Image (spheres, rainbow, N blue to C red):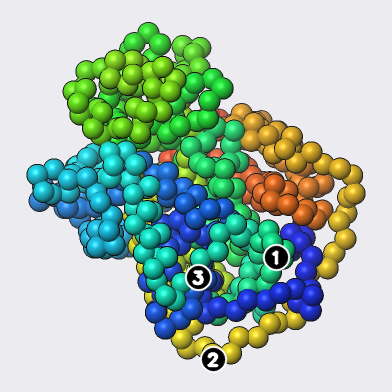
Amino acid sequence: MSRAHRYLVRFDPKRSPHYFTDVLVIGAGIAGLRAALDVSPDLDVLVVTKDQIQQSNSAYAQGGIAGVLSPEDRFENHIEDTLTAGAGLCDRGVVEMVVREAPQQIADLVALGTKFDEEEGQLALTREGGHSHRRIVHALGDATGFEVMRAVIQKAKETPNLTLWDDTFTLDLLTHEGACVGAIVHRPNQGKLLIWAKQTILASGGAGMVYRETTNPPVATGDGMAAAYRAGVELRDLEFMQFHPTVLYVAGSSRFLISEAVRGEGAYLRDKKMCRFMLDIDPRAELAPRDVVAQAIVRRMEETKHPNVYLDLRHLDPALVMRRFPGIAKVCKGFGLDIRTDLIPIRPGAHYMIGGVTVDEHGQTTMPGLWAAGEVTSSGLHGANRLASNSLLEGLVFGSACARGASDLAMRKSDSLTALPLASRFESESQEPIDVVDVTNSLRSLMARNMGVVRERSGLEEAKQDVEFWCRYALTREFEQRAGWELQNLLTIARLMIDAALEREESRGVHFRSDFPTRDDVKWQRHIASAEM
């Protein structure tokens, strides 16, 4: 792998403005804000996010948060469901910790003002694919993330020791003597700014925008993962990108997520001949885990030579459908579809990056001074396939864990923070113009073709060759705007994803190799790590 610049941009501490804080939190989704709120009130916390504070994957989460809240359910059930979905790569200790913390985390959100849906005075629970019981709390029918983030953002704005900066692009982590000491960011009216922190918590989200068809908002460009990699932090499991099975497919439209909860409430999957094909593939039918359903859909699309399959809600109670899925109904109506009476065209789309920055059960990365939580991480919870509605839960649990660890270490350090003589000086190795939009679109299309639900060696090698070519002339130059930095980060993560997919010569969870179609626990029940040298 060719060596690119350690930092994306040039900077000199003698010519740059500085900001000092006890704890820096990068990202304002559920993981970042949960961490910020749980940092000791005696410490100053700065939260930076590259767009508006409402723009995060967390805010777009539809389904809900999984937790054992029913007398018919047990922690052991949720643990086993998570381990089964994870296809042999989960860390059982982490799974048990997260599952057992779920009820309290949900109660904390209620205390913060989150208004979850209720039935007869109790939290309403639904079921999703891979779950053995109804254990998913939800809000506003199908807009759980929006409601949770509304409450959490409001609390963050009211918290005296928190400072929130939006429109702040994190370019790179600052490192000194093998430890993280803050970050270099860019703000529209200030330019480059050096932030010095006693402890840093990375919660910057995923990288779904590396694919042409994704449920992620445009902000999900892998910035935190790429910055951590450039800093020498270990990443792992990057071959495991989860594709959501049911994404609205209308030519020319953006790809809108159709929640797993739709199948949880009883919707069927049908092909163009109206065959309910999941019955022949898995005993759980439509409620099989996401990897099983997504791969079955792709195979059925190939067999029928049709660009999509369909979700069928026509047999469900129309009142239930409208009460549970008002947001989905509204979006579909915009395309002339009535979800009570019409079939919904869907196909899989990139949804959740399971791999990321390696962390332990406390959220500690492989670099001192740096913690991480949420989709940016590989925590051991999801294994090779994330169980539905475990993602917001992971962000909450690990956000809290990072806050505890970072608070403890930050309070041990002296009150004085000093700018260090770190500098980045290089010359761009290419002066030729580059069409950032064209390369970005080409990358996303290439990843969709060759690194999608189904993969094989020749396609992966073609992708590797193309991405390495783009890297040679995109990673060795300095950009001055967000689109260029995002392209560099997407290329960095795409290259690592392809390398890991080539290395894992088996099929496991969301990683399906048609040339190695079976799971091989003897050789491959292990993680694949990536770290810049």
Residue 250 at x, y = what percent?
Answer: 49, 21
Q: Nearer the viewer, residue 460 or 369?
A: 369
Q: CA distance from mark 3 to mark 2?
A: 21 Å
What's the residue at 22%, 18% (across, down)?
Answer: 315
Q: Quadrant of residue 381?
A: bottom left
Q: Which residue is mark 1?
A: 190
Going by the image, does 206 lie left or right of 171?
Answer: left
Left or right placement of residue 237 versus residue 434 in this view: left
Marks 2 and 1, the one that precedes in the sequence: 1
**Residue positioned 54% across, 90% down in the render:** 415
The disc placed on residue 351 is: none
- Amino acid type at mark 2: Ser
Q: Residue 343, position in %: x, y?
A: 35, 16
Q: Is residue 267 above or below residue 381?
A: above
* Image coords of residue 533 (percent x, y): 70, 64
Neighbour tally class for label 1: few under 14, some 14-19, many 20 plus, Cα within 10 Å = few
Q: Amino acid at mark 1?
A: Gln
Whether residue 157 is visible, yes or no, is yes
| Residue at horizontal 31 percent and vertical 32 percent from the top | 326
Q: Secondary structure at mark 1?
A: loop
Q: Which residue is mark 3?
A: 163
Pick the residue in front: 249 or 524: 249
* Distance between mark 2 and mark 1 Cα atoms: 29 Å
Q: Is residue 450 visible?
A: no
Residue at 41% over, 65% down: 156
Vertical placement of residue 155 versus 323, above or below = below
Measuring from the top left, give residue 164's x and y in whole percent.
51, 65
Q: Which residue is mark 2?
A: 414
Q: Nearer the viewer, residue 106 or 186?
A: 186
| Quadrant housing residue 262 | top left
| Amino acid at the residue labelled 3 | Thr
